Image (tube, rainbow, N blue to C red):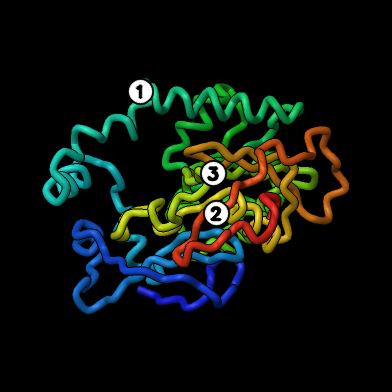
């Protein structure tokens, strides 16, 4: 594991901390000595990111996601977390209501941009079922762990949905995503909540006490701050209770899309560990 003392999104040093740990399944699968590896939950007031200060290294990531959600993975995880096998279908069965909503949502989000998707790269989406279902017959290429890297500057739309929360170091990751965008192309990021928090809610309530698959928890402000740091300009953004969705173009792109606005409302003030108003900047990062 790799410990960080600064924010992995904005680089800030003034971080709030509280106790944490590593889930037994993760410790076992990644071969982490949890007793010898102190882990803290961290919150950055500057960009509103929640994360664990110990990050998985490349070897640990490979061990965690090798055979991800295949039968051996499910059996192993169910031993550590009884009941996981029964929850598993909602993550992998495209007929499940959760996944049908994701498919229809992605299709609607892309349609809202008012341009055909053209060449599409699904980055980190397993076998690419989400993008293939949303755009049947589309020109879709899928990239996940392993295999040849996609060609640079080749895609009109790069989709990275529910991947960023698994990534240890998001800045180099998004910098890489940027290299696959064709001139005039779009990047679509989607991450699970907190998105927005009700006013007055303690910030650490939005992450569990132990590290599991999600090593970071993004608000809409944190996603937009990350994009800005990586030289990308958000052109459409939506923050709701359990998800943040953002389309972005490179900062130097001359393309001024008709939907260039912050369609998500301003993030409300939230109560940090010391009871302070943590909004700091506007919801537009």
Q: Mark 2 or mark 3, which is nearer to you?
A: 3
Q: Residue at x 24, y 59 (%)?
A: 23
Q: Can residue 57 be seen in this view?
A: no
Q: Which of 130 and 251 is in front in this view?
A: 251
Up the image or down, 264 lies above or below 275; here it is above
| 1 and 3 marks in contact (CB < 8 Å) | no
Q: In this view, does 277 lie to the left or right of 194?
A: right
- Residue pointed to by mark 2: 149
Q: Mark 1 or mark 3, which is nearer to you?
A: 3
Q: In this view, does 115 lie to the left or right of 264?
A: right
Q: Which mark sits nearer the N-terminus, 2 or 3?
A: 2
| 1 and 2 marks in contact (CB < 8 Å) | no
Which of the 4 quarters of the picture holds residue 34? Answer: bottom left
Q: Mark 1 or mark 2, which is nearer to you?
A: 1
Indicate the secondary structure of the residue bearing disc 1. Answer: loop
* 10 Å crowding of disc 3: few (<14), some (14-19), many (20+): many
| 2 and 3 marks in contact (CB < 8 Å) | no
Instruction: Report how many numbered discs are placed on residues in the image.
Output: 3
Q: Residue at x 31, y 69 (%)?
A: 19
Residue 88 % position (x, y): 26, 35
Up the image or down, 92 lies above or below 172; here it is above
- Residue pointed to by mark 3: 196
3D distance between C-alphas at marks 1 and 3: 25 Å
Q: In this view, does 7 lie to the left or right of 157?
A: left
- Residue pointed to by mark 1: 96
3D distance between C-alphas at marks 1 and 2: 31 Å
Image quadrant holding the N terminus, namely: bottom left
């Amino acid at each position: 594991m790799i410990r960080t003392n600064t924010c992995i999104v904005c680089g800030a040093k003034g971080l709030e901390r509280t106790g944490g740990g590593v889930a037994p399944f993760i410790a076992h699968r990644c071969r982490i000595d949890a007793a010898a590896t102190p882990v803290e939950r961290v919150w950055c007031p500057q960009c509103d990111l929640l994360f664990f200060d110990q990050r998985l290294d490349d070897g640990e990531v490979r061990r965690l996601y090798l055979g991800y959600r295949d039968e051996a993975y499910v059996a192993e995880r169910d031993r550590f977390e009884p009941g996981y096998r029964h929850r598993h279908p909602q993550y992998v069965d495209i007929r499940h209501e959760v996944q049908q909503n994701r498919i229809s949502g992605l299709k609607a989000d892309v349609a809202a941009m008012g341009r055909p998707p053209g060449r599409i790269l699904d980055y980190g989406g397993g076998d690419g079922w989400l993008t293939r279902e949303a755009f049947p017959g589309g020109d879709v290429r899928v990239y996940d762990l392993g295999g040849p890297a996609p060609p640079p500057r080749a895609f009109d739309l790069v989709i990275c949905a529910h991947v960023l929360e698994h990534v240890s170091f998001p800045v180099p990751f998004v910098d890489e995503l940027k290299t696959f965008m064709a001139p005039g192309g779009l990047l679509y990021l989607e991450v699970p909540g907190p998105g927005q928090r009700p006013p007055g809610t303690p910030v650490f309530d939005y992450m569990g006490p132990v590290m599991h698959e999600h090593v970071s928890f993004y608000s809409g402000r944190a996603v937009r701050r990350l994009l800005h740091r990586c030289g990308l300009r958000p052109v459409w953004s939506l923050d709701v209770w359990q998800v943040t969705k953002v389309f972005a173009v490179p900062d130097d792109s001359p393309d001024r899309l008709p939907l260039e606005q912050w369609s998500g409302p301003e993030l409300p003030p939230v109560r940090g560990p010391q009871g302070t108003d943590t909004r700091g900047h506007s919801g537009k990062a």
